[in-house]
Amino acid sequence: MERDPLDSKGLIREAYRIDGIESPECRSIFLDWALSLPDDQDQNAAITRLLGQYGADNPDHPMTQVLREGLEAGESPRRRGGWRARQRD
């Protein structure tokens, strides 16, 4: 199977395959996915593409709802830790 550059760990793909998965688990998976995106990747573009790939066939799936919520939230601030978090912009 070819690796999807927007879902390199296969987290979103696997979430759609889990029977009985609920929103809290999907949110946790989404957070892990979002934190693993490359810094230069547009999060909204990635979510839009994943929604197109999975959401149309699974409109009532909890991961589809979580992806929609992520898209509505817009571009979130990037995580900054270590010395960069203490620097003034």
Image: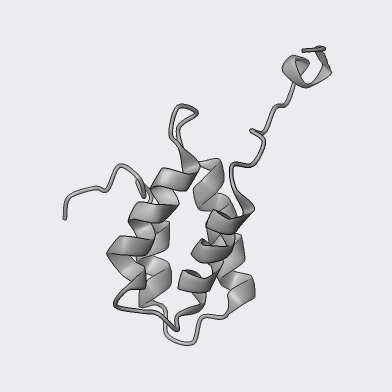
| Residue depicted at x 55% and y 67% | 66
Tell whether 21 sits left or right of 50.
right
The residue sitting at the left extreme is: 1
Identify whether 54 is placed above or below 4.
below
The residue sitting at the bottom extreme is: 20
| Residue depicted at x 64% and y 42% | 76
| Residue depicted at x 70% and y 27% | 80
- Point out residue 56 in the picture as x, y percentages from the top left corner: 31, 73
| Residue depicted at x 64% and y 73% | 24
| Quarter of image, res 50 | bottom left
Colour style of the rendered protein structure: one colour
Image mark count: 0
Say which of 59 and 11 sits in front.
59
In the rendered image, which quarter contains the N terminus?
Answer: bottom left
Tell whether 57 sits left or right of 28.
left
In the rendered image, which quarter contains the C terminus?
Answer: top right
Tell whether 29 sits left or right of 80.
left
- Point out residue 83 in the picture as x, y percentages from the top left corner: 76, 15
Tell whether 12 sits left or right of 74.
left
